[in-house]
Image (cartoon, rainbow, N blue to C red):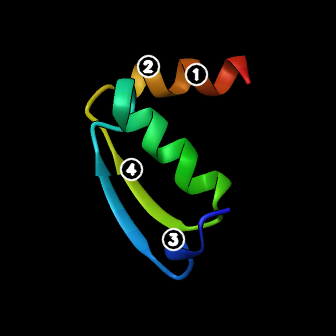
Amino acid sequence: MYEDLNNKVAVITGGSKGIGTAISERFGKERSRSLSTTTAMKMVLKKQQTK
């Protein structure tokens, strides 16, 4: 766990694929607060169904 991410908030654009997804997942693992945005809602819903 990275202590420097504690009590931080991130706004992540392009969170549905690639680097945006990786960053979103990492912030989730670190239990940091984040808001992820995307215009590709179909892709996000498809990923949720496979988990």
Instruction: Give the farthest residue toward the bottom.
Output: 7
Question: Which circle's residue, 4 or 2, is located before the other in the chain?
Answer: 4
* Residue at mark 1 to residue at mark 2: CA–CA distance: 6 Å
* Residue at mark 4 to residue at mark 1: CA–CA distance: 14 Å
Question: Which circle's residue, 4 or 1, is located before the other in the chain?
Answer: 4
Going by the numbered disc 1, the residue's amino acid type is Lys
Q: Secondary structure at mark 3?
A: helix
Q: Decide if residue 11 is on the left or right side of residue 8.
A: left
> Which of the two marks, 3 or 2, is nearer to us in this view?
3
Q: Secondary structure at mark 4?
A: strand
The answer to whether the residues at label 1 and label 2 have Cβ atoms under 8 Å apart is: yes
> Which of the two marks, 3 or 1, is nearer to us in this view?
3
* Residue at mark 3 to residue at mark 2: CA–CA distance: 27 Å
Q: Which mark is residue 5?
A: 3
Question: Which circle's residue, 3 or 2, is located before the other in the chain?
Answer: 3
The answer to whether the residues at label 4 and label 2 have Cβ atoms under 8 Å apart is: no
Tell me if mark 3 has few (under 14), some (14-19) or many (20+) residues whose alpha carbon lies within 10 angstroms of its own.
some
Residue in front for this viewpoint, 25 or 35: 25
Point out residue 41 in the picture as x, y percentages from the top left corner: 38, 28
- Please name the residue that numbered disc 1 is placed on: 47
> Which of the two marks, 4 or 2, is nearer to us in this view?
4
Residue at left offset 28%, top offset 36%: 14
- Please name the residue that numbered disc 4 is placed on: 36
Q: Decide if residue 4 is on the left or right side of residue 30.
A: left
Instruction: Give the farthest residue toward the right.
Output: 51
Q: Decide if residue 34 is on the left or right side of residue 50.
A: left
* Residue at mark 4 to residue at mark 2: CA–CA distance: 13 Å
- Please name the residue that numbered disc 2 is placed on: 43
Residue at left offset 39%, top offset 30%: 16
Point out residue 18 in the picture as x, y percentages from the top left corner: 37, 24
Point out residue 35 in the picture as x, y percentages from the top left corner: 40, 59
Question: Which circle's residue, 3 or 1, is located before the other in the chain?
Answer: 3
